[in-house]
Amino acid sequence: MSLYIGREASKLWKRICAETTTEINLLLENWKYILGGLICQYIHGLAARSVHYFHHPGPILQDSGFLLLPELGQERAYVSETVFTFVFLSFVLWTFHPFIFKSKKIYTVLIWVRVLAFLVACQFLRIITFYSTILPGPNYHCREGSRLATLPRPDNLLEVFVIIPRGVLYGCGDLIFSSHMIFSLVFVRTYQKYGSRRFIKQCAWLIAVVQSLLIIASRKHYTVDVIVAWYTVNLVVFFVDHKLPELPDRSLGGLVLPLSKDGRMKEEGTKLVNGNSGDPVDRRSRSQANGKVNEESDNVHVDVLDGA
């Protein structure tokens, strides 16, 4: 028994090492996109904090969702955040599953390049909309009488550029459209395309709908913020996805990396395509594909001889 466990642990360790080597090579090729996406995340957070300085509390606007959905109350505001945290952590763990499991359809670095591209495009539109019209926030800490409804003038420039977690949780003014729904819908659509479990896909869409209702019931956003997020994010992902190069299919062992200036594939890409990543599943798939190609070539050769 101990021998079997040791052998399986050794296989798992080799798989992790091989996958790490593959992903590092991909990261070296795509680090600019990853870094640019992370910088844009900071810019988005900075814009959301900055608009809080201009927010002025006022009467809550008339909202059909508020009339239809009962108010959860301030003491149950954690419910929607718990659902969002579950979605966020589940997606992050799924993107790193190739390091552990044998069945692999994605490369972690490439999937995050794609996700960050979706997020940046959606967040750029979000910044434009919530700066265009600053609505009075419906959340409890944004209402009249709350000391958190408006930020005091900053004492120095550093205070403006430092984003603290408390400021993210208690922001006001960045309403149209919901940032939580941006992340959730981008994650769900990405898994819809690259995930393999149909049941999980169905559950993911159901959770996105439930989260939308919880956000409105928690009075964290107006209904329009959630509705605009649903059609904007889906449209943005649809168009951006068609502009980006398609991810390689790992089941065929193919990996296409950017070409060098002389038109040849870079050395790292050649190594990965030739199967030096150490992934037994990928090598097996490549062997089967090569066998089919050789078999078809033999059949063509025999047909030519018969015709002669």
Image (tube, rainbow, N blue to C red):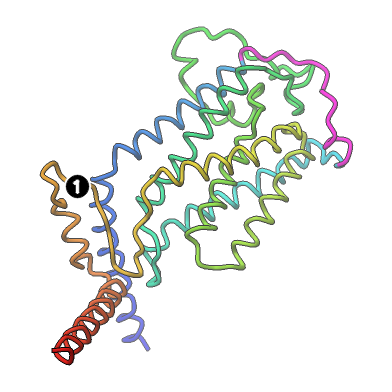
Q: Is residue 129 above or below residue 217?
A: above
Q: In this view, does 42 lie above or below 295?
A: above
Q: Write the residue at 67% across / 17% down.
A: 133
| Residue furthest bottom as drawn | 306
Q: Write the residue at 75% across / 31% down.
A: 222
Counting from the top left corner in percent of width and height, residue 130 is at 62, 22
Q: Is residue 97 above or below residue 214?
A: below
Horizontal arrangement in the rendering, residue 31 relative to residue 202 (left or right): left
> On the image, numbered disc 1 is attached to which residue?
259
Q: Main secondary structure of the magenta part?
A: loop
Counting from the top left corner in percent of width and height, residue 162 is at 47, 21
> Is 66 a magenta residue?
yes
Tell me which amino acid carries mark 1. Leu
Classify the position of the N terminus by image quarter.
bottom left
The quadrant holding residue 293 is bottom left
| Residue furthest front as drawn | 308
Counting from the top left corner in percent of width and height, residue 220 is at 72, 33
Q: Write the residue at 57% across / 52% down.
A: 188
Classify the position of the C terminus by image quarter.
bottom left
Magenta part of the chain:
53-68
Q: In this view, does 72 lie above or below 254?
A: above
Closer to us: 162 or 179: 179
Closer to us: 81 or 257: 257
Closer to us: 197 or 290: 290
